[in-house]
Amino acid sequence: MFRRTATSTKGHSFLHVIKLVSPFVMVVLLQAAIAGFSLEVMSSVRAYVAGEALWSRSQKNAVYFLHRYLHSGEASQFAQYRVALAVPIGDEFARWALERDPVDVEVARIGFLQGGNHPDDVPGLIWLFRYFNRVSFLQEAIREWAATDPMLLELSVFGEVIRSELENGPIQDDDRLQFLSSRLSDLNTQFTVHAKRFSTVLGEGSRAIKLTLTCINIVTAATLILLLIWHTRRLVLQRQAFEDALHAEKERLAWQASHDWLTGLSNRRAFEARLQSELDNSAAGSLGLILLDLDQFKSVNDSCGHLAGDRLLCQVARLLQQDRHAHDQVARLGGDEFGLILPRCPHSKAVDIAERLRRSFELFNFAWDDRCFAVTASIGVACIADRNTTLEDAMRRADAACYRAKEKGRNRVQVDGGRPDVIVVTARPREAARA
């Protein structure tokens, strides 16, 4: 059973940790995915920029070597022309394979390799063309690229025409030679224009992509930071709430340890601790200690039940708290017994307070289920001037005075120390008592 509970606790803790870190993991994974995507896009664009440079240079070389072949007739020049021409033709085949439906990836790969592109760059070239060819900058670059197809075809045919004419010996017709040279120059100019536009568009697109991806990465990083701040704040608030709840629970337990659960007054433990503190304070002057018992509590409890008795005790607690000074201590000591500590209270004032309490009880009526009970109190007063008095002695003196008040007829105040009893004046039809 213990093992199962421990395993369940560990599993719950693990799930809690997963739940706690999952937002961060998701954002970090998103950041990593965006970073990887950014690198892939920039690498592919860079590959196109490098391929464009090779493509443009090869076209120029093809025109250059064909022009030299036209004037020299050297077979080596024609061979170099063919090598140079193979590069843009390979790129052209690759583009056609990628524009085909379905896409022929293998032909595109062979074409890009023939175009002199690095093998590691070929997958990126194919990926960028397939999935981003409708992006404005790439679409415009592809148009410039495709615009050279007729010129490339013309250059290829032109090379074969020149070769066939040179097989019969050097061209003697100056006008024919001038025409062929001029046409080669025109093709070179047209190639240059489209290559420059292609390069410009790719450069602008590359910068736009870099800016866009940078902004996306900044936004993602800012999101991660905000999530971290929010999550940290939530954890701090949770911890604060936990600490507040713990503090409240400690206060509740401390309150329960020092208070009576029914009336909310201090309990005997807190009452005696306060009394001991007052007795230890030798500079505080005289001290009044009052203990009182309810005279009719048992009859209310027996005739109406414990619920009525509890209600009576709560009303008595409120009555005792009326007109009390902030430094006075009122406590329920148990059952129907209550106590009051009156710090810095002279003897006469303590007796006067006890008598006012007795009159308040005499005027107090407790109602329950259409029945009314007259409630009085027997009150014992101990006036302590000697601070060498022990706690047990002080409580004993007040308790003895309360007991004598009950013995002498109840509803009266009895003062400890051999002093005369306070004369009881009651508005009810009962006999006044004198000690």
Image: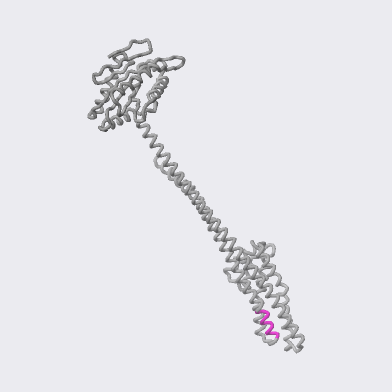
- Give x and y (percent) for residue 412: 32, 16
Read off the magenta span.
Answer: 61-70
Residue 379: which quarter of the image? Answer: top left
The residue located at (39%, 34%) in the rendering is 252
- Give x and y (percent) for residue 308: 42, 19
Residue 123 included in the magenta stretch of the image: no
- Give x and y (percent) for residue 169: 73, 89
Q: Nearer the viewer, residue 159 or 435?
A: 435
- Give x and y (percent) for residue 3: 40, 42
Q: Nearer the viewer, residue 329 or 355?
A: 355
Residue 354 seen in render: yes
Above or below: residue 27 compared with residue 65: above
Left or right of 403 on screen, residue 142: right
Residue 62 included in the magenta stretch of the image: yes
Q: Quadrant of the C terminus?
A: top left
Above or below: residue 269 compared with residue 6: above
